[in-house]
Amino acid sequence: MKKIILIFLSSLLFGCESFFFEEYRIIQPKIYKQKEIKYYTVKKGDNLYSISKKFNLPIQKIIKSNKIKSPFKIYPNQKIFLPKNKIYSVKKGDTLYSISRKFKTDIFSLASFNKLNNINQIQVNQKILIPENNLRLKEVRKDKLKKIEKKMVKKKKIKKKVKISNSNFIWPIKGKILNKFGSEMPGFFNDGINISSKPGTSVKASRDGEIVYSGNEIPGYGNLILIKHSQNWITAYAHLDEIIKLKGNFVKKGEIIGLVGNTGNVREVQLHFEIRKGKEAVNPLKYLS
């Protein structure tokens, strides 16, 4: 579970580092400006996670800059160098989705990292902090050809698994499709589908799995549930009126996990539903049965 990427989420929320260091733990510490300090003296009780949140820096960036080796322990009075964040200036035609793909991250990490209230509204020349989600602690192999070959083999295996898993997901609710997967209008990309429903309609788990996130800390999504399934699949259920199943619960396909609502950045009662293979969002309509 600690090796999966998120979510969502879905689809889908702090990406790899939140699973590796503390699953979906969301805190609001005092944030220091980068110009104020270049080195930090470790205090009693500090750890890499708390320092990364205090200075709004990715954990892996701190590890790499300070050459901290496994098991990634730090000690009181140790001097920690604070590297600068990567900053991207929004250009005309950019969307948060296109930026997430450009830097190989996800919308949830970008929104959380930049404290964006509306993921569909970014402005030209707006400065976006870019999180680094890939924790690279192993040395890169010299033989690049073998590495490329391995990637090609993995892609083929994933494609085979996708075909086998197509019929494993059920509809979380039944209703009219308000928004389909993909780009239906300029500057907006939908990572899932939005299904219209009546208030209080039960939302069902699309497949067996474990709830790895339940809450409303992610801007725009309202009450949200993320479920991790086998083979690194993740489903997301957003805009819920009520969350019934909490983080840590194991649920069966078809089990009720919440009630439909209109929390977050929507007015009409609906469910935003996503299916992801790791970080990559896929079209739910191709997988639901």
Image: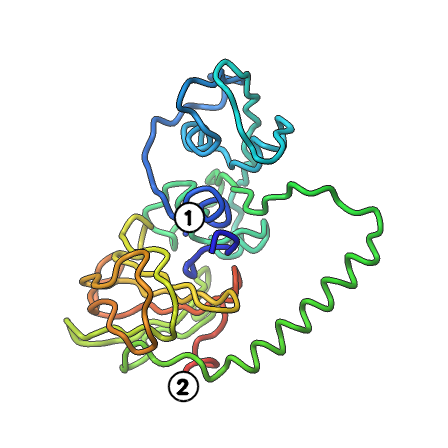
Q: In which quarter of the image is residue 46?
A: top left
The numbered disc on residue 92 is none
Q: Distance between the residues labelled 1 and 2?
A: 36 Å
Dot 1 alpha-carbon crowd within 10 angstroms: few under 14, some 14 to 19, many 20 or more: some
Toward the left, the furthest residue is 200
Q: Which amino acid does label 1 sit on?
A: Ile
Q: Position of residue 82 (x, y in %)?
A: 54, 24
Tell me: 250 left or right of 233: left
Toward the front, the furthest residue is 71
Q: Closer to us: mark 1 or mark 2? A: 2
Q: Position of residue 134 (x, y in %)?
A: 59, 47
Of marks 1 and 2, which one's residue comes earlier in the chain?
1
Residue sitting at x 44%, y 23%: 33
Tell me: 2 left or right of 248: right
- Element type at marker 1? loop
Residue sitting at x 52%, y 68%: 231
Q: Where is residue 273 in the image (x, y as percent from the top left)?
A: 36, 69
* Circle count: 2
Between 81 and 37, the residue placed more toward the observer is 81
Between 16 and 230, the residue placed more toward the observer is 230
Image vertical order of residue 69 relative to residue 246, above or below: above
Q: Which amino acid does label 2 sit on?
A: Ser
The C terminus - image quarter: bottom left
How was this image coloured?
Answer: rainbow
Q: Quadrant of residue 44?
A: top left
Residue sitting at x 42%, y 33%: 53
Q: Name the residue under label 1.
A: 122
The numbered disc on residue 289 is 2
Q: Where is residue 19 in the image (x, y as percent from the top left)?
A: 46, 49
